[in-house]
């Protein structure tokens, strides 16, 4: 008995070798019919004996290609067609876009071997790829994912590549970016005047130049890197000067995992991340013996590490490793990705550039994460993860959620899926704002989404809010900053709420016009109630205070200790001159351009300043990072704090903590000890607050979010102490707890409100 069926498969099914796999399975089962890419996903029609068809369907269901992610798998019976064979049909350009575009995939082991094999025709070829690896998100112009719709459209395949592409038994069967030295993109080494450097081997010469101490711009997948020899202090210093980035940690690329292990402690799940197809930057603990110049990451004991993820990286690192690799831009500006920007890089930052002629269609930074146990803690979610979709709690009309002003990421939704953008960056820079405009346009077009709801932060002065208001759509919904943080974490864990939402954060606009950031909320998606918060103090000079931990320390001392504060400051805040103290005290007491804030981030800044970090910060979070690095992790008793339950919302006061810190400083206690006890006081205060709330509201779920949760020491303490009190504790592992995860929460809240 013959039968014919159709199968429609949606999810991440294009650019991952799906059609070749279907083809092979169909051949093996002796079926006829076809497979094709459509905007609705992969469509298969297969015909043959009933048993063979059933077996084929089962095999495809059980063993899709490794990089695929199947969301839906639908079958239907059809009348017989009577073809002679099974074919891969041409793509169909229109319809409802439901397919997922794969992220860029790091070079696979097979391709890695080929480029190092002198007998292989791809020996030394830096753009080698196959169906399992290579660029995807950064080269797709539009869907469906076919070579003509990618940055490879101008490179017609040579006969040898074409033969691989057409051969179902080949690893490159249907690999859209397939290329070789004969037909594919080519490398070029150029100097500061964009003139070619004459060399038969650009990679070897580039390695020599790096060895001599030069800074090299390197064209990667989603933009340019700036790199230099990671073993030499001098080029690192020069790179810092040129980028105006005095302290912010640089990432280091190592040739191999073995080499990483010589410099850092690598746990199994960290090794798994480093060697995964996403190949993110993983933050590891440096070994005690300082093997690389401390200037690479002066503020911490950690080091951001990654492995080569393109053949070009492999070939370069084979010749010289390790290399400092940092995004090619001025600090906080979008990653440079086009020719004009390269010229700017060459004039300003780099001495040479190793470039090629495959255009970068879409900018995309490296992802950065840290492992806390087996769980990912994202600092930045970009290459290798974008544009993988995240499941939402509600189905609804398409939403554009614009995110926040720092570490901006926006989200687009389709039915029950949220697609988060790559890291856009800081919007207070004009270039960042421009990037947001073009990236929203680009991703909406690529995914075929026309937003009907625009979600944005409550902050009236955010550039992102301005952008949202100007975006034409039927509905606009404002979402409070910390409600969005909490909701983002709820989405990840598929929680319906209500939950106890703990948002420890930098600055976020509160509905009362003050600046929130140390918040405990009772929240579901639709709404929230502020049930407890850190004791407010003044933010002298507004947002600008974020740059000055010293001023935050002074503001805390004045708030807590009044007249006593002067003696304390004279003793422990020597960098604050007496006149400045007086001026700031006036500003604080009169509230001139000094809003009230409950920010947890600013409390960490204040304590960092008391413990000696008294200069302005040079990058976001610097003082808190120093404080974490300082903290003794051995068990210590938490400092005292006060939970004022007579007020509504409750007030979590660290006045007693600050007094104890000053006392310990006077007693000459080690700063590491003080920092350790402070971290424990914050964890203990949150735990006691949650325990008190449970009595009132009988809730067991606690979600943890906000930028302060990037502090994995604090996060670990919170998990531990809340868990020991019987709470189910959830923190974020799909998107960053910082403002890079805000858009996901905004989208979920907007959808919940839309249906109220
Ligand atoms: Zn490969
Ligand atoms: Zn070729
Ligand atoms: Fe935030």
Image (tube, grey):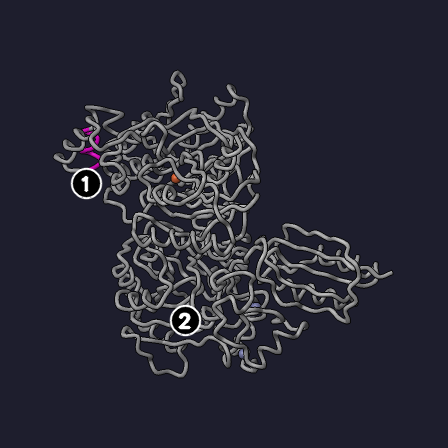
Q: Quadrant where the N terminus lies?
A: bottom right
Q: In the rendered structure, does residue 209 fall within the stretch colored magenta?
A: no
Vertical placement of residue 593 versus 122, above or below: above
Name the spot of residue 608 as percent of width and height, x first: 30, 39
Q: Earlier in the sequence, mark 1 or mark 2?
A: 2
As drawn, the residue found furthest toward the left would be 579
Q: Which residue is mark 1?
A: 575
Q: Quadrant of residue 188?
A: bottom left
Q: Say if residue 112 shows up in the picture.
A: no
Q: Say if residue 106 shows up in the picture.
A: yes
Question: Residue 214: which disc?
Answer: none
**Distance between the alpha carbons at the discs numbered 1 and 2:** 43 Å
Ligand 3 in which quarter: top left
Q: Which residue is mark 2?
A: 320
Q: In the rendered structure, does residue 569 fall within the stretch colored magenta?
A: yes
User: Could you classify mark 2 by the number of other residues whose Cα lies within 10 Å: few (under 14), some (14-19), or many (20 or more)?
Assistant: many
Q: Secondary structure at mark 2?
A: loop
User: Could you classify mark 1 by the number of other residues whose Cα lies within 10 Å: few (under 14), some (14-19), or many (20 or more)?
Assistant: some
Considering depth in this image, is 578 or 744 the residue closer to the camera?
744
Q: What residue is rendered at 38% in x and 25% in y?
A: 652
């Amino acid at each position: 008995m013959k039968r014919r069926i159709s199968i429609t498969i949606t999810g991440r099914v294009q650019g991952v070798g799906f059609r070749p796999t279907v083809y092979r399975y169909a051949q093996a089962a002796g079926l006829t019919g076809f497979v094709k890419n459509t905007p609705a996903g992969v469509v298969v029609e297969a015909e043959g004996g009933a048993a063979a068809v059933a077996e084929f369907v089962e095999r495809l269901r059980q063993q899709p290609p490794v990089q695929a992610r199947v969301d839906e798998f639908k079958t239907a019976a059809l009348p017989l067609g009577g073809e002679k064979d099974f074919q891969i049909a041409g793509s169909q350009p229109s319809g409802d876009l439901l397919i997922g575009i794969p992220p860029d995939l790091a070079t696979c082991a097979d391709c890695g071997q080929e480029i190092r094999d002198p007998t292989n025709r791809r020996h030394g070829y830096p753009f080698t790829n196959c169906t399992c690896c290579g660029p995807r998100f950064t080269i797709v112009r539009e869907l469906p994912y076919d070579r003509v719709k990618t940055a490879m459209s101008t490179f017609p395949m040579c006969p040898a590549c074409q033969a691989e592409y057409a051969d179902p038994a080949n690893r490159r069967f249907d690999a859209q970016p397939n290329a070789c030295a004969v037909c594919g993109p080519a490398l070029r080494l150029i100097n500061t005047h964009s003139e070619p450097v004459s060399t038969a081997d650009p990679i070897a010469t580039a390695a020599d130049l790096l060895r001599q101490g030069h800074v090299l711009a390197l064209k990667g997948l989603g933009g340019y890197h700036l790199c230099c020899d990671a073993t030499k202090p001098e080029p690192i210093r020069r790179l810092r000067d040129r980028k105006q980035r005095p302290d912010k940690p640089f990432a280091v690329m190592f040739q191999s995992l073995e080499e990483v292990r010589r410099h850092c402690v690598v746990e199994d799940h960290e090794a798994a991340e480093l060697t995964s197809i996403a190949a993110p930057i993983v933050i590891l603990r440096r070994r005690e013996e300082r093997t690389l110049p401390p200037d690479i990451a002066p503020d911490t004991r950690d080091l951001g590490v990654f492995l080569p993820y393109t053949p070009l990286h492999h070939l370069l690192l084979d010749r010289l490793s390790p290399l400092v690799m940092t995004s090619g831009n001025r600090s906080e500006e979008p990653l440079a990705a086009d020719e004009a920007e390269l010229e700017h890089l060459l004039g300003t930052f780099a001495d040479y550039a190793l470039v090629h002629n495959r255009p970068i269609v879409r900018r995309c930074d490296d992802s950065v994460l840290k492992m806390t146990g087996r769980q990912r803690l994202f600092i930045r979610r970009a290459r290798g993860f974008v544009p993988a979709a995240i499941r939402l709690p509600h189905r609804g009309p398409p939403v554009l959620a614009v995110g926040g002003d720092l570490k901006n990421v926006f989200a687009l939704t389709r039915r029950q899926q949220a697609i988060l953008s790559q890291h856009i960056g800081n919007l207070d820079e004009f270039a960042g704002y421009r990037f947001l405009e073009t990236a929203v346009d680009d991703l909406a077009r690529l995914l075929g989404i026309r937003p009907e709801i625009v979600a944005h932060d409550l902050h009236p002065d955010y550039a992102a809010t301005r952008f949202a208001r100007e975006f034409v759509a039927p509905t606009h919904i404002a979402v409070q900053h910390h409600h969005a943080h909490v909701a983002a974490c709820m989405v990840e864990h598929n929680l319906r709420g209500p939950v106890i939402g703990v948002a420890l954060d930098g600055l976020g606009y509160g509905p009362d016009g003050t600046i929130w950031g140390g918040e405990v909320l009772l929240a579901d998606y639709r709404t929230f109630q502020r049930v407890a918060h850190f004791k407010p103090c003044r933010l002298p000079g507004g947002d600008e205070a974020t740059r000055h931990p010293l001023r935050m320390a002074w503001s805390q001392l004045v708030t807590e200790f009044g007249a006593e504060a002067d003696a304390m400051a004279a003793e422990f805040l020597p960098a604050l001159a007496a006149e400045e103290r007086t001026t700031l005290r006036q500003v604080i007491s009169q509230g001139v351009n000094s809003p009230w804030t409950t920010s947890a981030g600013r409390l960490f800044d204040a304590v960092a300043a008391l413990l000696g970090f008294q200069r302005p910060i040079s990058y976001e979070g610097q003082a808190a990072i120093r404080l974490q690095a300082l903290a003794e992790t051995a068990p210590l008793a938490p400092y005292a704090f006060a939970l004022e339950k007579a007020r509504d919302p409750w007030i979590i006061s660290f006045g007693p903590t600050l007094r104890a810190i000053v006392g310990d400083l006077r007693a000459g206690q080690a700063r590491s000890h003080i920092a350790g006890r402070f971290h424990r006081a914050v964890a203990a205060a949150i735990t006691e607050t949650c325990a008190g709330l449970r009595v009132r509201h009988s809730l067991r779920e606690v979600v943890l979010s906000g930028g302060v949760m990037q502090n994995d020491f604090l996060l670990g303490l919170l998990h531990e102490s809340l868990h020991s009190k019987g709470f189910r504790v959830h923190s974020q592992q799909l998107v960053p707890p910082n403002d890079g995860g805000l858009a996901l929460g905004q989208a979920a809240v907007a959808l919940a409100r839309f249906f109220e």
